[in-house]
Image (cartoon, rainbow, N blue to C red):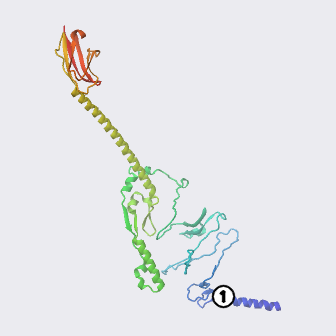
Amino acid sequence: MKKIVILTSFMMLMASNVSAQLKVTSEGKVKISSSQTTSGSTLLVGERQYESNSTIAEITGFTTAKGSKNNVGVIGVVDANFNISNDKNYGVLGIVQEMNYTHGRNYGLCGMIGFPGNHHGGAGVYGTNCTYYYEYPDNIQGLYAGFFHGDVKVIGDLVASNVFVPTDGRLNRNVISLNEVRGETSTLDNLLSMNVIEYNMKSRANKKLSGGIEQQETEVDREALEYLMKDEMEMSSRRHYGVDAKELQKVYPDLVLEGQDGYLAVNYVELVPILIRSIQELKAELDEIKNSSRMDAEARGASLKSETETNVLSSTVHCNILYQNTPNPFKEQTSICFKLADNAQNASICIFDMTGKILKKLPISSDMDSVSIAGYELGEGMFLYSLIVNGQVIDTKRMVISK
């Protein structure tokens, strides 16, 4: 009997504590360890207070059933009414209302994954744009802080230490050289046809921004709008540089994406290989010009050398003169007159028979003006004589020896 009384008393005490911790309001809202009265939430847990290492609620999903498909710790689902224009819909919302100003470890939403080595792969945050991936999620190879399957859009600056695009040959197909694709039109010509522009982004359309700060109902709304307007002003005042998406789309349509909002976006990362190819084409053209210039220079040099030699020869010919022998024909003796330049060297009068065989060579100098030939030295017949200076034949004439 005593045990029954003790057990009954313990159960009443527990019920009293539970009643004190768990409350259901007349509106059907449930409060656990909370005395807050201003929240519009259906379930309210905990107080707004400052505690060391406090956790308001901890929910752990643990499934041991064989063949289990999904193990979920927390699910947040919102089914919006299609007939009502809801202002906002959040499946899960995390807010750090009062931040700690002594450090930067304030997170509205935190996703983590276990220590490396404890599993094959996964991500601290996994995001997709389709609920089908709940049943068929990606089998992630490796560990990532975030993994997204689908389009990701950022309004504002995206800062990253490095950005890599998968281009491993094992992942590619239909690989061909870029110059084989464009045909007769060069990559450089395609780029030169585009206009490089400098611009400012237009302000984004926002009903609250168009309403003005003074028209906001609460102080919180006014502070929020003031922050949004400042952020919008900073973004719209910054100058940007790029290419016209429509122009690029004409020559490289795969580098331009029409977003879900209808606006065009440029893939500047994959524009880099196009620039590399254009540099290669420019280098080839420069090499061709250099080779052509070198050949032209060599040709001009050869022409100049030939012209110089011709001028020298012409000068030599004009400064060194051979005259006809007198008398001609002759029997006893004849005189061959000539004129030599002052710098003439290795000059001579050479006499040949009609077959070209040299019969006599007479050295001469610039201080001489003639030489004499006796008829008996050569005999009867027709002969040729030439004035030769510096190894060049200046002139050739005929003479006749008679009986």
Query: Which x, y percent locates residue 252?
Result: 42, 58
Residue 116 seen in the current view: yes
Q: Is residue 145 left or right of residue 363?
A: right
Q: Amino acid at mark 1?
A: Gln
Q: Is residue 241 left or right of residue 22?
A: left
- Give the residue drawn at x 40%, y 49%: 283
- Give the residue drawn at x 73%, y 90%: 13
Q: Is residue 356 above or below residue 50?
A: above
**Residue sitting at the far top:** 403
Q: Quadrant of residue 325?
A: top left
Indicate the quadrant containing the C terminus: top left, top right, bottom left or bottom right: top left
Q: Which is more toward the observer, 184 or 125?
A: 125
Q: Is residue 27 left or right of residue 294?
A: right
Query: Which x, y percent locates residue 57?
Result: 64, 80
Q: Is residue 399 above or below residue 124?
A: above
Residue pointed to by mark 1: 21
Q: Which is more toward the observer, 392 or 270?
A: 392
Q: Secondary structure at mark 1?
A: helix
Residue 140 seen in the current view: no
Query: Which x, y percent locates residue 300?
Result: 31, 38
Q: Which is more toward the observer, 27 or 375?
A: 375
